[in-house]
């Protein structure tokens, strides 16, 4: 089932696009969680990390090469950044078109905030 990201790929709704090639598109997150927060998405529709198949390997590999280029272009490569792919409810996934978050621009601290119930 299509999501809002399909409309962004089709340029039917606006997005602040920072990178595009034949397989992936990258644009700034509408609700940034860090000074730099960019989403990189495959142009083909893959709902979640659970739905990945061998046919997706080229596009999903491209997410990483695009992320490396974007990090360099945005000036965060040397200091570092975090790449995140959320899956389903426990992962906190909200948009069911697989995407990679690039978060950077400051020290991001521990990977997860520990809760008292953990
Ligand atoms: P996730 O929780 O991993 O599914 O992340 C979905 C992300 O998409 C969130 O960080 C949202 O802020 C972001 N998002 C939702 N709609 C848009 C949009 N139209 N343009 C840019 N980012 C969006």
Image (cartoon, rainbow, N blue to C red):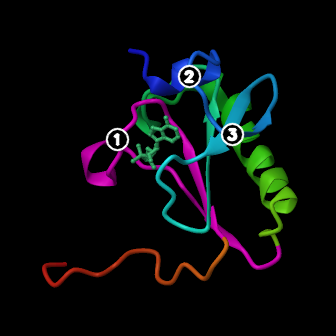
- Residue 80, percent across and down? 72, 74
Give the image quarter of residue 20.
top right
Label 3: which residue? Answer: 26
Label 1: which residue? Answer: 94
Residue 100 visible somewhere in the drawing: yes
Q: Residue at x 29, y 81 (%)?
A: 114
Q: Residue at x 55, y 67 (%)?
A: 34
Residue 13: mark in rendering: 2
Q: Is mark 2 within 8 Å of ligand 1?
A: yes
Q: Is mark 1 within 8 Å of ligand 1?
A: yes
The N terminus is located in which quarter? top left
The magenta region covers: 78-104
The C terminus is located in which quarter? bottom left
- Residue 62, percent across and down? 75, 38
Residue furthest toward the left? 117
Q: Nearer the viewer, residue 45 or 108?
A: 108
**For numbered disc 2, what is the local secondary structure?**
loop
14 inside magenta stretch: no
First of labels 2, 3 by sequence position: 2
Give the image quarter of residue 56.
top right
Which mark lies nearer to you, 2 or 1?
2
- Residue 50, percent across and down? 41, 35
Residue 45 visible somewhere in the drawing: no
- Residue 60, percent across and down? 66, 36
Q: CA distance from mark 2 to mark 3?
A: 14 Å
Q: CA distance from mark 3 to mark 1?
A: 17 Å
Q: Nearer the viewer, residue 11 or 64?
A: 11
């Amino acid at each position: 089932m299509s999501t809002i990201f399909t409309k962004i790929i089709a340029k039917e709704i606006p997005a602040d696009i920072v990178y595009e090639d034949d397989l992936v598109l990258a644009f700034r997150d509408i609700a940034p969680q860090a000074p730099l927060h960019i989403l990189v998405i495959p142009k083909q529709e893959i709902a979640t990390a659970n739905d990945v198949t061998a046919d997706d390997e080229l596009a999903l590999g491209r997410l990483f090469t695009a992320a490396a280029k974007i990090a360099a272009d945005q000036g965060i490569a040397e200091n570092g950044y975090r790449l995140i792919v959320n899956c389903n409810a426990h992962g906190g996934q909200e948009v069911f078109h697989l995407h990679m978050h690039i978060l950077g621009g400051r020290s991001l601290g521990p990977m997860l905030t520990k809760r008292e119930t953990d």
